[in-house]
Amino acid sequence: MPSIRTKEFTPRASEAINNPTIQESLGRLSNFRQGREEAIAEFGQERWDEYKKRAQEIKHETMEHLDHYLDMLSTNVERAGGHVFFAHDVQEANDYVAGVAQANNVKTVIKSKSMVSEEMGIADVLESMGIEPVETDLGEYIIQLAKEAPYHIIAPALHKSKEEVSELFERILGTPAQSDITALAAIARKVLREKFLKADMGMTGANFGVAETGTIVMVTNEGNGRMSSSLPKVHVATMGMERVIPRLADLSTFLPLLTRSATGQRITSYVSFATGPRRSDEEDGPEAFHLVILDNGRSNMLADPQLREALYCIRCGACLNACPVYSKVGGHAYGWVYPGPIGAVVTPSLVGVPIAKDLPFASTLCGACREVCPLNIDIPRMLLKLRSDANEGPKGTRKANRVEAMVMRGWRMTVGGPRMFTMAGKVATLLQWPLSRNRFLRRLPPPLSGWTRSRDFPKVAAKPFRSRWAAMALPPSKEGSDGD
Amino acid sequence: MATKEAFLTTVREALAKGGQTPAILVPEVDVIQNATDLRKGLAQRKDALLSQLQKNAVLQEWNVVTVGSEAEARDAVVAIAKGLDADLVVRTSHPMIERLGLDEALAASSIESVLLTSRSGNLAPDRLQDIAARADIGITGVDYVIAETASATLVSRKGMTRMSSLLPPVHIAVAHIDQVVENLGDLLTLREAELAEEDAPNWYMNLVSGPSKTADIEQTIVIGVHGPGEVHLVIITG
Ligand code: SF4
């Protein structure tokens, strides 16, 4: 398992906030946001909502019968001539993959991007055996050279500027400095092409594992996934157990949601369906196919009705792009494999709440993540749940400190009754003037100064919302809640 | 070591299910009838599907050539190869590609054309990769084309190597209008019917929907990373 640095959230977050290159890179997340919005507009909002609903229904059906569909998936992979290994944790998964590599006398492994293989830390394991693991997705390759963790689920090297990439290539590959991005990509193409042609094992993830046919579906743009699953004599695919879907036809629902949410694409350049190893009538393709299905704590999420829906995630990355916290603190602050809002839910569940207790607090609970999520996963509710687990939960891991407890008590008193609430609002309006600039408070006094160190706190409005609300005329049909 | 049973037991416990999962009823569908009905429907909408495909193919960065006959398709392919100064092309053996008589036509322009197979010719299996990696262009037929996403669907089997459309820097896909379907669902319906009789259905396939690309450095799009950076879709309407 890669090192877990979830306890360093605060220092690593402020490091990112104070790094102008990283802030510039994070600024580019707006491309993803815009791409997604345009793609949905083209698709049609109503149709989009229908697809979302259908996707949720399929995931619900899958998760409630997960045992059944995993059984079906493995039976069908085996029927197609593949091997399936069910791994309880990363240790078992790594041992299995290491065993396959050893049995096949493997020297070089080409990998296409897979979050599960990051979770396993398989590259380190292979390396320790004297096997060369080569990441082939351009972004993954860059961070492999830099010995870093992925910054973003779909853009692992999001934080690197072209100058940094050039410097990295210069230092490690000995290539001359380049300021042109196309030329940098060409360098990687050339170096990696040689690896592709000589590798004896390919590792890929699986965006979907189709139970009905035993098919692994890989959604990629570069073509490295196709190479990793076609050229070497052994193909090993790894997937989290929640990636199973019942039927091929379900892809009609999931693919448009995935690619449009992730990059705003109608479809990616390649969608590859791999079913077992090369068949007897095929010309090329791997001689052996192995599928590793990983639990590694996912069954804990499955067992918790409040977290089960987090397993619906299709790893599109939209919640990262939408998150005001991720957009500031970046991916490494989250300290493990999965960053952003979904990372803040998944990581504590997989590595344990005690060591990842800061993550559920790395959110403003603004709800943007849920808004953009194609599966409508209620991340804010889950974060609240994990916060309470961290604070007083059954494992009693994070005791609220005194100040926090005091603030909470005060808050309960204040909002407890309309009279106190109204009065508090008036007092706040009077007290804030020395601190405020425009409509925002730039600095709050301690112990709240931590909040405003990196963001502004909205000023308390002179006229309370309740009085403005009363003054606004409501159109009769719009009364009541819209729901969500 | 976790066995499958132990693993699935953990899952069942997490779901608070006791013992075996009750079987899930799958509705019976007549895949053959579905495919027949679909084909009829598609045949009636050929023109609309063609223009949908042409529009989306351009958006997906295919170079689109629409021709009226197989002879014109052959000329179009040769023109592309000549324009690229190609020396060596590899190709697959879809029936339509065979009918084009590409080998002779390319040879007339001193371009070597190799059918990439170890089954019918005299190529050893381990030579395929070398040749494909050296080729300037890979020419393939397609099994279907999806109009909605401009996806050429390639099923790999005898005479149809995966690497023909993957290793060369340029890919030319030749399709006939009768192979155009509207969406992924249509494709699956037709494939399902084709595979209905098979014991181990061949569900290996690739949807190719444009050139290989990346935006991994500063979110700047670069075309042609590992797969072909230039892709041509030749559509025969006659
Ligand atoms: S939680 Fe939703 S938005 Fe976030 S990566 Fe998963 S599917 Fe995408």
Image (cartoon, rainbow, N blue to C red):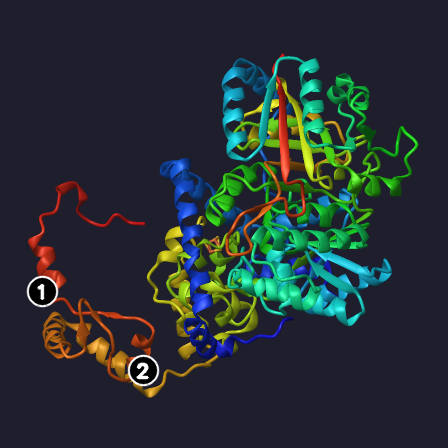
Query: What is the three-letter code of the residue carrying label 2?
Result: Glu
Q: CB of mark 1 within 8 Å of CB of mark 2?
A: no
Q: Mark 2 — on which chain does it sit?
A: A
Residue lying at the far left of the rendered structure: A471
Sequence-wise, the earlier of marks 1 and 2 is 2
Q: Circle 1 sits on which residue? A: A463
Of residue B155 and residue A18, the one placed in the foreground of this image is A18
Picture quadrant of residue B74:
top right
Task: From the viewer's perspective, tell me whether residue B159 is left or right of residue B231.
Answer: right
Percent of width and height locating residue A149: 58, 67
Left or right: where A435 falls relative to A127: left
Look at 79% across and 45% down and name the residue there.
A81
Seen in the picture, residue A36 relative to B53 is either above or below; the reply is below
Respond whether the residues carrying marks 1 and 2 are from the same subunit: yes
Task: Tell which tag, 1 or 2, sits nearer the viewer.
Answer: 1
Q: Residue at x 77, y 29 (%)?
A: B92
Q: Nearer the viewer, residue B122 or B204?
A: B122
Q: Which mark is residue A404?
A: 2
Image height check: is A471 above or below B98?
Answer: below
Q: Is residue A367 visible?
A: yes
- Quadrant of residue B111 within the rendered picture: top right
**A78 versus A420 height, above or below:** above
Above or below A34: residue A325: below
Mark 1 neighbour density, 10 Å: few (under 14) some (14–19) many (20 or more) = few
